[in-house]
Amino acid sequence: MRKILADIPYSILLALAFFMLLAPFHPMPHAVEKLLMLKNGQLSRPIDIFDLCFHLAPLGLLCLKWRLERGRS
C-alpha cells in the first residue's frame, strides 16, 4: 500500500480530492450536504454513509500520503 501511495503524485491527489469534495457543483456539494446531515443526526441511510466515505476518500489518501512521507524524513 505504501508503494502504491508513494507512486501517486501529489498533484493528482490534490486535484482528485478537490474535485470530489466539490462535486456536484450545483446546488450543493455532496460532501458538504452529507457533513451537514451528519451534524444534524440525519445520516442514517447506508447509501448516504457510503456517499460521504466515497467523497472523502481522496482527501483521506492525500492525508495518509502526507503523513507517511512526513514520518519518513
Image: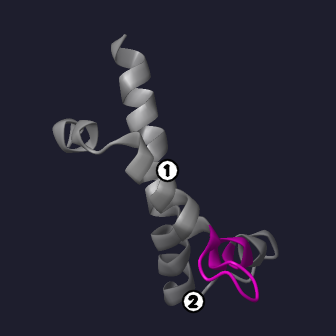
Q: Amino acid at mark 2?
A: Arg
- The mark found on residue 45 in the picture is 2
Q: Which quadrant of the view contains residue 34? A: bottom right
Q: Is residue 68 visible?
A: yes
Residue at the image position 37 percent from the left and 24 percent from the top: 69
The quadrant in which the C terminus is found is top left
- First in sequence: mark 2 vs mark 1: 1
Is residue 53 within the magenta segment? no
**Residue found at the far right of this picture:** 40
Of tags 2 and 1, the one toward the viewer is 1
The stretch of residues the image draws in magenta is 22-34
Q: Which quadrant of the view contains residue 40? A: bottom right
Q: Amino acid at mark 1?
A: Leu
Residue at the image position 64 percent from the left and 79 percent from the top: 30
71 left or right of 7 in image: right
35 left or right of 51 in image: right
The quadrant in which the N terminus is found is top left
Is residue 25 within the magenta segment? yes
- The mark found on residue 55 in the picture is none
The 10 Å Cα crowd at callout 2, few under 14, some 14 to 19, many 20 or more, is: few
Residue at the image position 74 percent from the left and 78 percent from the top: 37
56 left or right of 28 in image: left
Give SS at disc 1. helix
Depth order, front residue of 52/25? 25
Q: Which residue is mark 1?
A: 14
The Cα atoms of the two marked residues, 2 and 1, are separated by 29 Å
Q: Is residue 47 above or below residue 51?
A: below
Q: Is residue 61 visible?
A: no
How far from the left and from the top, in percent, is residue 4?
Answer: 19, 44
9 left or right of 32 in image: left
Depth order, front residue of 59/35? 59
How far from the left and from the top, in percent, is residue 60?
Answer: 47, 51
